[in-house]
Image (tube, rainbow, N blue to C red):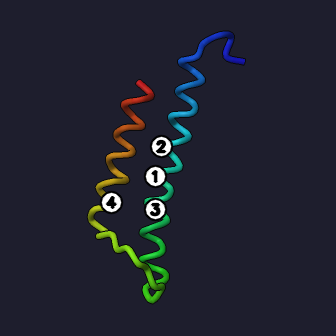
């Protein structure tokens, strides 16, 4: 499929990993909004989560160039 082009395969795995990390950030925000009374031992500030999602999208754009 890749005809020996390992960079293309590495790009696919990079995109997949960063997409999953971004979805985990969105999941964190959704849990904060929808289930406010859910007990959590660790607390993340919503601002920090939004910044992390932004940085993941920047990293994703840099890796696909």
Kindly identify which residue carries mark 4.
Answer: 50
User: Label 3, label 4: how many angstroms apart (C-alpha)?
Assistant: 8 Å
Asked whether disc 2 touches disc 1, contact meaning CB atoms under 8 Å apart, the reply is yes
- Are the residues flagged by discs 1 and 3 in contact, CB closer than 8 Å? yes
- Mark 3 closeness class: few <14, some 14–19, many ≥20 residues within 10 Å: some
Please state the total of marks drawn on the protein image: 4
Q: Residue at x 48, y 81 (%)?
A: 34
Instruction: Please tell me which of labels 3 and 4 falls first in the chain.
Output: 3
Residue in the image at 51% along x and 46% along y = 19
Q: Which residue was labeled with disc 2?
A: 18
Residue at the image point whose x is 57% and y is 31% from the top: 12
User: Dividing the picture into quarters, in which one does residue 44 lie?
Assistant: bottom left
Q: Report the Cα–Cα distance between label 2 and label 1.
A: 6 Å
Relative side of 44 to 9, left or right? left
Badge 1 marks a residue whose secondary structure is helix
Whole-percent x and y of residue 36?
A: 43, 85
């Amino acid at each position: 499929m890749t005809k020996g082009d390992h960079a293309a395969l590495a790009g696919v795995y990079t995109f997949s990993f960063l997409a999953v990390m971004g979805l985990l950030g969105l999941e964190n925000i959704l849990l904060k909004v929808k289930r406010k009374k859910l007990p959590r031992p660790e607390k993340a500030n919503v601002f920090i989560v939004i910044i992390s999602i932004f940085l993941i999208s920047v990293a994703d754009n840099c890796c696909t160039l």
